[in-house]
Image (cartoon, rainbow, N blue to C red):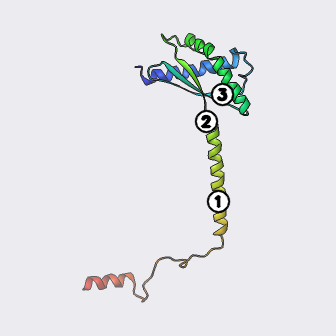
Amino acid sequence: MADNARAKRLADLIREVVAQKLQRGIKDPRLGTHITITDTRVTGDLREATVFYTVYGDDEERKAAAAGLESAKGILRSEVGRAAGVKFTPTLAFVMDALPDTARNIEDLLDKARQSDAKVREASAGAMYAGGADPYRKPEDSETLEDAETDDTAE
């Protein structure tokens, strides 16, 4: 089993090689400039690599990019093998990265929370306290705290 540092270095190399090859070397029209390689992970035994990518566009462009990556998998793997110089070139699996969709959902939820906070702020602008401005009870007689303490110690 390889160490984590070696797997990380190989993952970084795979990400760079795949991104460069997609940008300059593959002439498939489905793999235009709208594909971004976001992350790469390699298993501990260096046999399999998962390449995460995003496609900026609609669903048709995403499906076309997935088909293009699947068809270019062999070329990309051979380029990775040439650049890495390892005994066994890892197999490549391409996975659509859900990060942009997740970030968009989080932003929507944060906007809803801000709107809700603004409504609460508006509703509480002219509100009064339910029990008065000072919520703490005070003794009904004019006894102070010092008087109460001296009474307790005197007994």
Badge 1 marks a residue whose secondary structure is helix
Q: Which residue is mark 1?
A: 116
- Return the x and y of residue 125 as percentages of the image width and height: 65, 70
- Return the x and y of residue 15 as percentages of the image width and height: 58, 22
Q: In which quadrant is the N terminus drawn?
A: top left
Image check: 10 left or right of 123? Answer: left
Three-letter amino acid code at disc 2? Ala
Badge 3 marks a residue whose secondary structure is strand
Q: CA distance from mark 3 to mark 2?
A: 12 Å
Q: Residues within 10 Å of mark 1 (few under 14, many from 20)?
A: few
Name, please, the residue furthest toward the left.
155
The disc label shown at residue 98, or none: 2
Residue at position x 44%, y 24% in the image: 4
Residue at position x 71%, y 27% in the image: 34
Three-letter amino acid code at disc 3? Thr
Sooner in the amino-acid sequence: mark 2 or mark 1: 2
Q: Relative to 12, is 100 above or below?
A: below
Q: Residues within 10 Å of mark 3 (few under 14, many from 20)?
A: some
Q: Relative to 87, is 68 above or below?
A: below
- Return the x and y of residue 128 as percentages of the image width and height: 60, 76
Mark toward the viewer: 3 or 2: 2
Front position in the image: 74 or 15: 74
Q: Relative to 9, is 104 above or below?
A: below
Picture quarter containing residue 96? top right
Residue at position x 63%, y 74% in the image: 127
Q: Which residue is mark 3?
A: 36
Front position in the image: 19 or 98: 98
Sooner in the amino-acid sequence: mark 3 or mark 1: 3
